[in-house]
Amino acid sequence: MNGFYQACITFTGQNYGAKKLKNCKKSLLYCLMYATLAGVILGGGMLLFGKSLLKLYTKTNESLNYGMTRLVIICSTYYLCGIMDVMVGGLRGLGYSIAPMIVSIMGACVFRLVWIYTIFKTYHTLNILYISYPISWFITGLIHVICYIIIYNKIKKKNFNIIEGQF
């Protein structure tokens, strides 16, 4: 899904440089759609073949069960990570890199540390630990969407007068 993040930066940056703001939004939407689709298909594939793949690393039932627990939580929601990454690409393509960096550090790192020292400390199970990943992806992605809307409208208002994509 990182390829869709890279594509989003590239196409957004090119269209922004060409003063085609409408195409920036279009690039973002396509990349979001493809990253989500890839996440769902590949995540589903991992779930479908998870037990067989895990058997390459371990033979014990206990280890396989722990591995499947992680795969179910992470792979079924991994598309959220793709959405989060593509939103960063859209923001960076518009010339904003500091805001998504700070949001990503706070959401993907600080949030998880706080989770470990509060929620996980209280409810000490692997499920509680693993669920912090999709929750952090969702929250961080949502904040990126809000940032994108604010920045996009700011750029539109500042640089594009009457018709979107024209000066």
Image (spheres, helix red, strand yellow):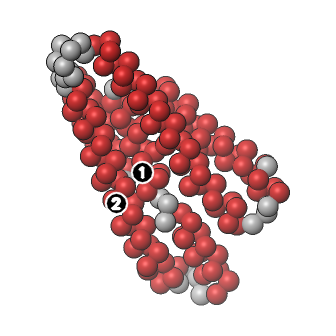
Report whether 34 appears left or right of 105: left
Crowding at dot 1, Cα within 10 Å, few <14 / some 14-19 / many 20+, comes out as many
Q: Looking at the rendering, which quadrant does residue 159 occupy?
A: top left
Where residue 138 sits in the image (x, y, percent)? 53, 48
Dot 2: element: helix
Residue type at numbered disc 1: Gly
| Location of residue 12 with respect to 121 vertically, above or below | above
Crowding at dot 2, Cα within 10 Å, few <14 / some 14-19 / many 20+, comes out as some
Residue type at numbered disc 2: Ala
| Location of residue 107 with respect to 118 vertically, above or below | above
State yes or no: discs 1 and 2 in contact (Cβ < 8 Å). Answer: yes
Of all residues, the one furthest to the front in this rendering is 162
Q: Which residue is mark 1?
A: 82
Where residue 26 sits in the image (x, y, percent)? 24, 38
Q: Looking at the rendering, which quadrant does residue 104 occupy?
A: top right
Dot 1: element: helix
Q: Which residue is mark 2?
A: 38
Where residue 55 sits in the image (x, y, percent)? 53, 84
Q: State the CA–CA distance, disc 1 to disc 2.
A: 9 Å
